[in-house]
Image: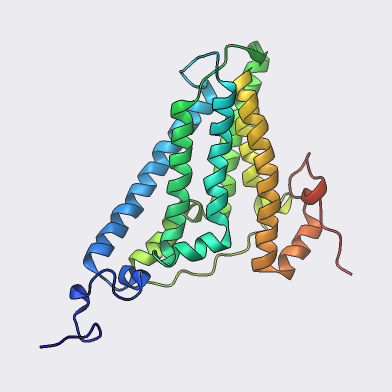
Amino acid sequence: MTHTIDSMPKSLVPAHAGSRPQAWEHGHTVYRMLGIVFGVGTQLLFLFTVVYLFLFLRYGSESIGSHWVLRDLALAIGFAVPHSILLAPPVQTRIKRYLPSGMLGCVHCCTTCVSLLVMFHFWIRSDDTVWHAEGWTAIGIVALFYASWVALLYSLWLTGLGYQTGLTQWWYWLIQTKPPVRPFVTRGVYRWMRHPVYMSFLGLIWFTPTMTLDHALLTAVWTMYIYLGSYFKDQRLLRYIGTPYREYATRVVGLPLIGFGTLRRYPPSN
């Protein structure tokens, strides 16, 4: 008896037959189990990485050495590279040939977490310091560090923390329901700046009572990355949202204090 792919039960169709994303979407047991494990594992990895990130930024690396400059520079830049590559539309289109769109958020989150964990593990701390605060000055700086964490979580909550970790997209894939359109948020702190998440992250890397040279290097690289990331995020939002975002950008600065160049308020359209 001769079977065609169309006449065969889905459970018997080889994984390479037809579209791979369709196999993920339409209940193929192995693919569903892999998707569930990947989604749950990504969220656990995210929680672990956040804890490690807090400890790393607050207390620095445990490894101390003299030949750290090139190594730490490569690690600081290396964190930004894979995340930026994944955001490129051609790369996302290629990934969607193999994975459903509901998995993209988890891929982004997992890649970011792995990049950070590699950086934490291999980072070398310098003995030299740019500044070392004590007494009430140190207490004030640490308080601003914790306040930056609160601001970061608040900003992410406004736009949907689940979108940042891939949980929301993955959940709708899991229940096989089309996700709702992600809202364009202009409330709360978004009334005063377009990129409060990036602004909060700047606080995490700048507010340290002891600024070692390696931390200063990390701060310089990530500050530049945040500036460039804010610019490219503006461009993506202009492309996806269009006129409403441009009108919003004419009223609200990108980042306060460094709201110059592309992060200033947009000039009104003629």
Q: Picture quarter containing residue 57?
A: top right
Viewer-proximal residue, 149 or 263? 263
Instruction: Name the spot of residue 237 as percent of width and height, x first.
Output: 66, 61
Tell me if 253 is positioned left or right of 269 in this view.
left
Q: Is residue 115 above or below residue 41?
A: above
Q: Picture quarter containing residue 208?
A: top right
Q: Is residue 200 above or below residue 38?
A: above
Tell me if 169 is positioned left or right of 247 in this view.
left
Tell me if 167 is positioned left or right of 264 in this view.
left
**Which residue: 55% across, 20% down?**
68
Tell me if 261 is positioned left or right of 57 in this view.
right
Instruction: Name the spot of residue 43 as percent of width and height, x first.
Output: 38, 48
**Which residue: 57% across, 45% down?**
154
**Which residue: 55% across, 17% down?**
67
Image quadrant occupied by the C terminus:
bottom right
**Which residue: 10% across, 88% down?**
1
Q: Is residue 141 above or below residue 33?
A: above
Q: Can the viewer see residue 154?
A: yes
Instruction: Name the spot of residue 171 as percent of width and height, x first.
Output: 38, 61
Viewer-proximal residue, 258 or 69? 69
Instruction: Name the spot of residue 103 as percent of width and height, x first.
Output: 41, 60
